[in-house]
Amino acid sequence: MTKYILIFAALIIGGFLSVQGSINAQLSSFLKHPLQASLTNFLVGTVILILLNIILKTSMPSLAEMKTVPWYLFLGGAIGAMFVTSVVLLIPRIGVTTMLAASIAGQLIVAAVIDHFGFFNVAVHPISLSRVAGIIMLILGIVLIQR
């Protein structure tokens, strides 16, 4: 039962991504450049995360701890900035549904490879015919959305 609650939570969070993308695209129309909307998004997120860390009394990692982290693990912020900026730029051109469906298809393709090979120390989940079929159906769904 817990697994289904977590899946439902993921569905809700996914829905919020549609709201976030729409809000950021609209925000960019009020600002001088779409990158300003992305920057505003990350600034607000940073302030919220600072407040949460203060409220929850977490500590900052030391410089020594940060030096032990492999360099590629810091790419998450760059990837996040790239995603948010793409959403701001693409939603006005291709729509929320197409943007998110295509980005989800891309996520699933890469996720299947990561799962199959166990990259980034994740548990190995071999690619199966049903996973490939699901990804293909999502890509077909994108084609149907465009008609």
Image (cartoon, rainbow, N blue to C red):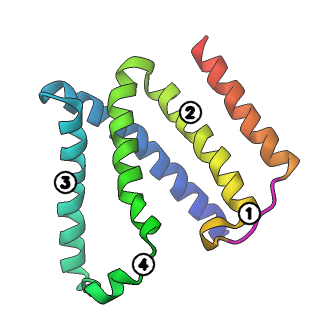
Dot 2 or dot 4, earlier in sequence: 4
Q: CA distance from mark 2 to mark 1?
A: 24 Å
* Highlighted range, magenta: 123-127
Task: Tell me if residue 2 is in the magenta stretch.
Answer: no
According to the picture, the residue beneath numbered tag 1 turns out to be: 117
Nearer to the camera, 98 or 75:
75
According to the picture, the residue beneath numbered tag 2 turns out to be: 101
Task: Tell me the crowding category of disc 4: few under 14, some 14 to 19, or many 20 or more residues within 10 angstroms, Cα based.
Answer: few
Dot 2 or dot 3, earlier in sequence: 3
Nearer to the camera, 56 or 33:
33
Nearer to the camera, 10 or 118:
118
* Left-right relation of 128 to 125: right
* Left-right relation of 62 to 109: left
According to the picture, the residue beneath numbered tag 3 turns out to be: 44
SS type, badge 4: loop
The image shows residue 115, relative to residue 22, as above or below, that is below
Dot 2 or dot 1, earlier in sequence: 2
Q: CA distance from mark 2 to mark 4?
A: 33 Å
Residue 44 location (% of width, % of height): 19, 54
Q: Residue at x 39, y 26 (%)?
A: 90
SS type, badge 1: helix
- Of marks 3 and 4, the one in the foreground: 4
- Of marks 2 and 1, the one in the foreground: 1
Specify the amino acid type for callout 2. Answer: Ala
SS type, badge 2: helix
Specify the amino acid type for callout 3. Answer: Val
Q: CA distance from mark 1 to mark 4?
A: 21 Å
Specify the amino acid type for callout 4. Answer: Val
The image shows residue 106, relative to residue 43, as above or below, that is above
Quadrant containing the C terminus in the rendered view: top right
SS type, badge 3: helix
